[in-house]
Amino acid sequence: MAEDPNENQVCIREVQRTIADSSKALIERKIKEYNLSGLFDPQEGRIKRHGGGDCIFRGMQNHTSDSIKSLEGRTFAWADEAHKLSKRSIELLTPTIRAPGSKLVFTWNPESEDDPVETFFSENEGDSDFLCLTVNYDSNPWFPIDLRKDMERDKKRDPDKYAHVWGGEYRGMSEARVFRNWRVGALTPPENCIWYYGVDWGFANDETAGLRCCFPDSKTIYVDSEVYELGVATEALPAFLNGLPDARKWPMRADSARPESIDHVKRHGFPKLRKARKGAGSIEDGVSFLQGFDIVVNPKCANLERELKSYAYKTDARTGEIVPVVEDKNNHLIDALRYAVEGLHKRGRLIPQMIAPKPERLERPKDYQSRHRATESWKVA
């Protein structure tokens, strides 16, 4: 407006009960900071440009398809706290600001990938009329030293808070995230380690995913390889699974929902493939088992890393509280990991001899046989 006195602007919030809920006070402070007070006349409910247009402030929740027409002719709209905008508000706003050369600017702190503004930009990614920028503290050359100290404290003390406040990750994901016991890194497994393989079949709109893992020690699961692809035809599954090292040599467990896929793959070079167990509580038991280990993900397993960041418990839409039910998404490789190790636990609890090294043989006391010769249970053992 300082450069073009004829421009008319509107500042948008989803909810604006009074002008105090708007960005008006912030803009007035910036006018003074930039020594532009001589160009503007702040009035009740708007900021007037001397000899030109004005900037008004509106709440989208107060508008209908008819009342929104009052914004026609505005050439610039700024929607602040856009993560709170409803889908309805975005659909009302976008065709209204339509004068030649007009712009809509949305600013928001990421809250959830399901927020309408996130969907609005992701669905239009690649469109030359859209530009989406991520701006964090490291984009600010004047980042204050006091804030940097706060950021470093959060980074050490509360990684989940750091990820949202300073890194722009979705809020609530840290609290709702199923797995926090993982990291990215490369390990060298023992030469005689046992490898476990799992595969989750894809459907029309789902990816087929497979991986292999091992237990370098009794506290660690290491995933060193993955395969992940959308639209793998049944006849292409054997070649797809060959992307996992030595996959034909080791037992492999697969999603039992596709028996025809299991049968085809077994007949084409994977005779040790077997179906995974399913049933009530199987997901919870598998998740509980995996939560008991440190999960290390090889850097080349980028899809598993992404899923571990996103796999979350559901949030009650009415109360905002996290509930103990896992969302059925972001989980293709995680399901494959559950299948791979399901034979190692019973109801989420480790079967000790499956992972722990065999105990050393103890010498029997000299009088062992004389004390147990007549014990029938000893003969059976």
Image (cartoon, helix red, strand yellow):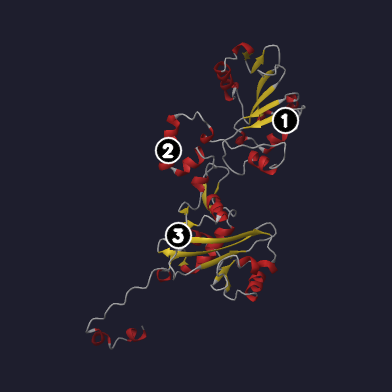
Between the residue at mark 1 and the residue at mark 2, the CA separation in whole angstroms equals 46 Å
Q: Nearer the viewer, residue 184 or 40?
A: 184
Q: Amino acid at mark 2?
A: Glu
Disc 3 residue crowd, few under 14, some 14–19, many 20+, Cα 10 Å:
few
In the displayed structure, does residue 26 sit left or right of residue 205? left
The disc placed on residue 152 is: 2
Residue 244, disc: none
CA separation, marks 3 and 1?
Answer: 59 Å
For the residues carrying marks 3 and 1, which lies nearer the camera in this image?
A: 3
Q: Amino acid at mark 3?
A: Leu
Residue 334 visible at all = yes
Q: CA distance from mark 2 to mark 3?
A: 28 Å
* Circle 2 SS class: helix
x and y, in percent, of residue 49 in the image = 67, 15
The reply to whether the C-beta atoms of the residues labelled 3 and 1 are less than 8 Å apart is: no
Labels 2 and 3: the sequence-earlier one: 2
- Residue that badge 1 annotates: 64
Q: Residue at x 30, y 86 (%)?
A: 375
303, 78: nearer the viewer:
303
Specify whether 118 is left or right of 143. Answer: right
Q: Quadrant of residue 242?
A: bottom right
Horizontal side of residue 350 vs 28, given as left or right: left
Q: Residues within 10 Å of mark 1 (few under 14, many from 20)?
A: few
Residue 169 pos. (x, y %): 54, 42
**54 vs 280: above or below:** above
Q: SS class of the residue under badge 1?
A: loop
Quadrant in which the N terminus appears: top right
Q: Which residue is mark 3?
A: 187
Label 2 near label 1: C-beta < 8 Å?
no
Q: Could you say where residue 56 lies in the image, as x and y percent from the top left?
A: 66, 21
